[in-house]
Structures are given as C-alpha cells and as structure tokens.
Image (cartoon, grey):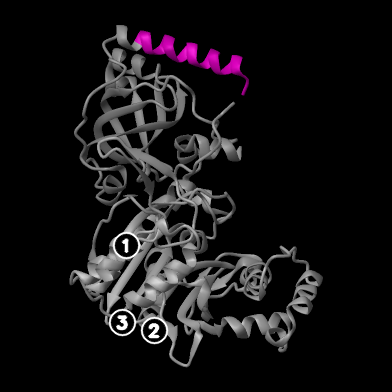
Amino acid sequence: MTELTTNEYRDQRLANMKQLAEMGYKPFGRAFARTGRLAEIRAGYEENKRVTAAGRLITIRLMGKSTFAHLADGTDKFQVYASQKDMGDEGFKAFKLLDIGDHIGVEGVLLTTRTGEKTIKIEKWTMLSKAILPLPEKWHGLKDVEARYRQRYLDLIANPEVRELFNKRTQALREIRNYLFGRGFLEVETPMMQALAGGAAAKPFMTHYSALGTDMFLRIAPELYLKRLLVGGFDKVFELNRNFRNEGLSRTHVPEFTMLEIYEAYSDVRGMQELIQGLIIHVAQTVFGTLKVGQGERAIDLTPPWREATYHELVKEKMGADWFELPLADAKKKAEAAGLTLDPAWDRLMVTHEVYEKLIEHTLINPTFVKRLPAPLVPLAKTCDDDPTLVDVFELVIGGSEVAPAYSEMNDPLEQRSRLMAQAGQDQMKIDEEFLTALEHGMPPAGGMGVGIDRLMIILSGSEGIRDVILFPQLRPKQ
C-alpha cells in the first residue's frame, strides 16, 4: 500500500467520521455495558435472547437495505445483522458509514441464520471509537517481519494465531504460579535497580539515581537478593522477573527478558531437577495439551524420563575419550579442525567450554540435564563431594538452548568470598559485601534455579525465535 493510498483511505474515513458526527454519532464514545464478551455470549446462546455486545468491525458486507458484519473483541468474532427495517432509516444510514476497524456497541436479539451462523440482529448501535487509519488487508495479512514486531497491535489484529500465542503465554505464567503456589512457594519482589549487578556474569545497563546521587545498575539477576530472603527465614521463594543484560541479539537472546528464579531451603540440585521436570510437563499438558512440541528437525518430546549426562561425558562423545588427557596444543588443533575459532590466550577450560557451547549444546533437542560442570564456570554453586573440581549443578537444555540452570547453592560465606574474589580479578569493587555479610548470618543449604521464560515459550509454542514470544521486542529506532 503506497503512502498516497493510505492518505486517501484516511481522508475518506475522516469524511465518514464527520458525517457520523453530524448525524449525532460522536466518533469516540465512553464506556459501554455489555452482556458479556463475545465468547461468553456464544457460550450462553439462546434464540431470541436480548444481548448487548461490543467489538471491532472486521468485516462488512453491504446488501442494499441490510448489512452483515463481524465484530471481534479478542475472545471471539460474532456475526451481526443490520437492517433498515429494524434500525430505522437514520440508524441504518449511519451504520453504512462505518469502516472496517471501527469499534461499536450493539443492542439486539440472538438468532441463527439460514446458513446456521449465530448472529446478533441489531436494533440499536453506538459509536465507540473511529479507526482513522485502515487495518492490514485481510487477504494479505501482515507479513513484513519488522512491521509485525514494530506494530504488534496490527499483528494481533491481522494474525489471530499470534494473539492466541500470547494468550497461551499468559496462561503459561498463570500455571507456573499455580504449580509453585501448590507446592508452598511464596512469590516475592526484589529490586530491579541495584548498586552492584551481581548473581550472573553479564554486562549491565547503567542508570543514575538522582535522589541518592549515585550510579545504579539494572539487575542482571535477582539471585543475591533472593538468597538474602533464605537467610531471613523464607524457605521457599520465587520471583517472575525482568532482567537486563547489555549484550547481543540473537534467536534466543534479547537484552530485556523474563526469568523465573526459584530457591528452596534444605533442598539441592536434585530437588530442583524434580521440580522443573514436573513444572514444564504441567505447563505443556495444561496450556498446550501435548508433550510433543515443535516440528520437523526441531520436534521435541517432553515425555519423561528426561536424559541425564555429565558435561565430561558429552565432551568426550564429541571430541573423543582422550580429550581431557590431550596436551593443550593438541586439544586446540582438534577443536580448530572441528571448525572452531579459538583465542590463542584461552586455557583448556575455555577451549573445552567453547566446544560444549558451539558443537554440543545445539544438538541436545530432547530435554537433557547436563550435570557436573567445571567449578570455575559456576562460582555460586557447591562443589561435588567426590570431586572438588566440579560443581553440583545441572543445565537443562531443550531444543538446543539452555532453559534452566540449577545449583546446590553455595552457603559457605568464606568459600563464597574466595570465589567471588577470583571472579572479580582486579576489580574487587564488584564484590557484593552486603550479600557476603548476609551469608555470614547463616544461609541454609538450598537448591536454586533460573528458568528462561521466553526460551521456554519458544519451545512449547514451536516458535522460530525469541522476538516471536515477546509482545514488544526491542528494535533499532526507525531512521
């Protein structure tokens, strides 16, 4: 559609709006009492029942002295029938000035047409909101990907399956809460602005707190505050939260994203493993009605039991049983021969983790608990009793992406300080002393877990990428 054509449509709609106003139909009305939403009216359908309904006109078929149209309100679409006989000359004349996209309220009775379609026969109608700009043409829809993200409201109107996806997302969040509430967890809120961006390794967004005269960071994770609550006596807590990481964009990464973080005192990583498997299965069955999600090569089977494998086992499967005995130079050659580009300064740990992230993780399609990771990768977890070089953790990988890391949480404040100092290197100011002080008051042993809600929705809905499951993903400003 050219800009000129858009302007012509707009001018015509403005002319219709002026005519309607002159006939007493104010273009932007007030609240309108409804019998119910359209889905509720359909569910309670009775022939000749009087109803009031409201919605957006999405089709109009003029037929001389009568008109058929469809209203939509986000729950359903419903046919309406307007005739000169039932509405009078003035009411029907004004009705014919309506455009697709206008919001109206109708009063009338229910009937079934000869074709079997449930319909509201209009006796009176009210103008509620004039659409000055046209909607995307029904037969073309809204296909331009950037336009769909930038003008999500049009995407929701033009593509009912998109609206249904976000209905499912809302239902999934509700069921996550219900599942956790049913197991005694308490939902809490922790600060989104923090003096130190802790709880994960990521580049933060910085802001300035004028009232306190200090720089602050948008949180990269709520972990260190939730652990303070364990110290304070809350034994089962979770937070559905927004996190911010000033990093790149990809199919599975955006700088602002939704996470679920869960902590349970006197539990450990095995308790988290049981919890996350049950939670995901519950949401899949309750909201999506299946444990078989995705299609083609990305088809995923969530049927338990889920695979368990250690980090070392997966690396050996890919790179050979002798990988961890190879000299570093030989390991680098082998990794480069497998297609990796390595930094010459990388040590064995970094080379091995590059192998895992680039060559292994994306191949784990069905749910896999990757266990016993190298300790330096996870400074906030307890080490394994039988091997202090490994940590008692898992990374749940589904569809080739990490969905939920979980730990047996470190609660030794002296060991925790040592690890955070090693992680901070020269920048000791990054160490959260208030968190360490809290730990010194005694944090119970605990299991903790983060769940990437956006990634989980990609998996359960079979979507292409993370921007498809976020209502308003961040985009570059239009030039």
Q: Position of residue 374 (x, y in %)?
A: 54, 78
Residue 175 seen in the current view:
no
Q: Where is mark 3, residue-wise?
A: 267
Q: Earlier in the sequence, mark 1 or mark 2?
A: 2
Which residue is denoted by mark 1 in the rendering?
433
Q: Would you identify the image quadrant in which residue 227 lies?
A: bottom left
**Amino acid of disc 2:** Arg
The residues colored magenta run: 1-19
At horizontal 53% and vertical 38% (from top left) the residue drawn is 475
The answer for how far apart the CA atoms under marks 1 and 2 are is 29 Å
Label the magenta part by its dominant secondary structure.
helix
What x and y, as percent, mark residue 169? 40, 55
At 63% from the left edge and 81% from the top edge, which residue is drawn? Answer: 314
State left or right for residue 122 relative to residue 336.
left
Asked if the stretch drawn in magenta spans residue 184, the answer is no
Q: Are marks 1 and 2 in contact (CB under 8 Å)?
A: no
Question: In the rendered structure, are the residues bearing label 3 and label 2 in contact, judged by CB atoms less than 8 Å apart?
Answer: yes
Query: Where is mark 2, residue-wise?
Result: 270
Q: Residue furthest top?
A: 22
Q: Which residue occupies the foreground of this view, 110 or 240?
A: 240
Q: In what element is the residue under mark 3?
A: loop
Where residue 14 is drawn, which disc sits there? none
Q: For the residue marked with disc 3, what is the amino acid?
A: Ser
Helix, strand or loop at label 1? It is helix
Q: Residue at x 73, y 78 (%)?
A: 328
Q: Is residue 280 visible from the viewing direction of this image?
A: yes
Which of the image's four quarters has the C terminus? top right
Q: CA distance from mark 3 to mark 1?
A: 25 Å
